[in-house]
Image (cartoon, rainbow, N blue to C red):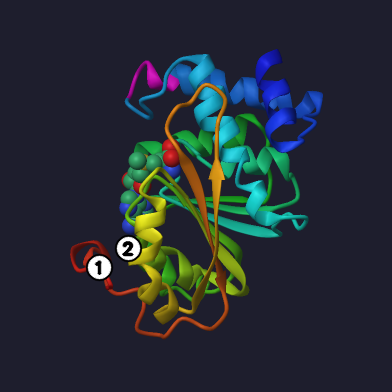
């Protein structure tokens, strides 16, 4: 854990508290334990979990600048990434974790319970349903996702959930610049404005990564998101 603590400080200027480190250690144990029984994530070793899951999730704070989100929704969270590590960083943040797969939702609920996290809602649902639900539509400071879909599809999942004045954040690999270019028109249509691509270099990880940061500048037209499955089958162009 010592190297991880140093990496977090060097990369993000983060000084993790003893409490935060203990929570991450417990999360790591639970992930390894559940992963031995079911396939939650392909990354299974402590070193990989710390860098490629925890540290990578933490990099989102580079998009938040000096204002930690009061509320955040993580779509396609899987085993909780990036939402749960961010909640460990920002204990007061209201967090909604969403995945369509039951066993992933079960795992997230388990971690929330063993870590005693409050103000966290874990939903087995599809992004397209929540985007049309009055309880979730345009209710979040930030709508985020990592490794869920191409950016033109992701924009239709995420932008309807962000409030005007908030934003969407996609954690992406090397295809980010091309995807961002191709998604410019859908982003505009859905009320977004592409603010920035932030390059991320994780220690010991060769592949290039980016945060795609989009400001929500106008309300999303009521027609979007379209019905479940339509955004991925017939992506906006
Ligand atoms: N974000 C996690 C991570 O980076 O480790 C998990 C990534 S996993 C490759 C993608 C997840 O997105 C899957 O668990 C899948 O069930 C979920 N997903 C895909 N489309 C979704 C949708 N429309 N609504 C909710 N969840 C979705």
SS for dot 2: helix
Q: How many marks?
A: 2
Which quarter shows the N terminus? top right
In depth, the one of 15 and 35 nearer the eye is: 15
Q: Position of residue 44 (x, y in %)?
A: 42, 18
Residue 89 image-quadrant placement: top right
Q: Position of residue 197 (x, y in %)?
A: 53, 55
* Predominant SS along the magenta part: loop
| Residue at (67% x, 25% y) in the render | 7
Whether 137 is drawn above or below 46: the answer is: below
Q: Which residue is mark 2?
A: 153
| Residue at (53% x, 71% y) in the render | 135
Q: Position of residue 56 (x, y in %)?
A: 55, 36
Of the numbered discs 1 and 2, the one sitting upstream in the chain is: 2
Q: Can I make out residue 126 in this image?
A: no
| Residue at (72% x, 29% y) in the render | 10
Any magenta on residue 226? no
SS for dot 1: loop
Mark carried by residue 61: none
Mark 2 Cα-neighbour bin, 10 Å: few <14, some 14–19, many ≥20: many
Q: Position of residue 164 (x, y in %)?
A: 60, 77
Query: Start and end of the magenta stretch?
Result: 34-38
Does ligand 1 reach within 8 Å of label 1's beta carbon? no
Q: Can I make out residue 68 in this image?
A: yes
| Residue at (49% x, 47% y) in the render | 210
Does ligand 1 reach within 8 Å of label 2's beta carbon? no
Any magenta on residue 37? yes
Q: Which residue is mark 1?
A: 235
Q: Residue furthest left?
A: 233
Mark 1 Cα-neighbour bin, 10 Å: few <14, some 14–19, many ≥20: some
- Answer left or right for 19 relative to 191: right
**Contact? badges 1 and 2 (CB < 8 Å):** yes
């Amino acid at each position: 854990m010592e190297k991880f603590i140093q990496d977090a400080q060097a990369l993000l200027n983060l000084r993790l508290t003893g409490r935060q480190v203990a929570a991450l250690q417990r999360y790591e144990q639970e992930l390894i334990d559940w992963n031995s029984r079911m396939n939650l994530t392909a990354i299974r070793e402590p070193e990989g979990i710390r860098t490629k899951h925890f540290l990578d999730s933490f990099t989102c704070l580079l998009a938040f600048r000096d204002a930690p989100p009061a509320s955040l929704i993580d779509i396609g969270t899987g085993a909780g990434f990036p939402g749960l590590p961010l909640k460990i960083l920002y204990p007061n943040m209201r967090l909604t974790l969403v995945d369509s797969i039951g066993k992933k939702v079960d795992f997230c609920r388990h971690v929330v319970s063993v870590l005693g996290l409050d103000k966290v809602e874990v939903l087995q649902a599809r992004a397209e349903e929540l985007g049309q639900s009055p309880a979730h539509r345009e209710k979040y400071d930030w709508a985020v996702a990592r490794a869920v879909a191409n950016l033109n599809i992701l924009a239709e999942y995420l932008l309807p959930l962000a409030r005007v004045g908030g934003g969407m954040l996609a954690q992406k690999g090397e295809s980010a610049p091309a995807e961002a270019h191709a998604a410019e028109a859908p982003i505009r249509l859905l009320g977004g404005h592409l603010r920035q691509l932030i390059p991320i270099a994780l220690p010991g990880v060769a592949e290039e990564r980016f945060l795609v940061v989009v400001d929500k500048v106008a309300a999303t037209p009521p027609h979007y998101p379209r019905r479940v499955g339509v955004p991925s089958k017939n992506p906006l162009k």
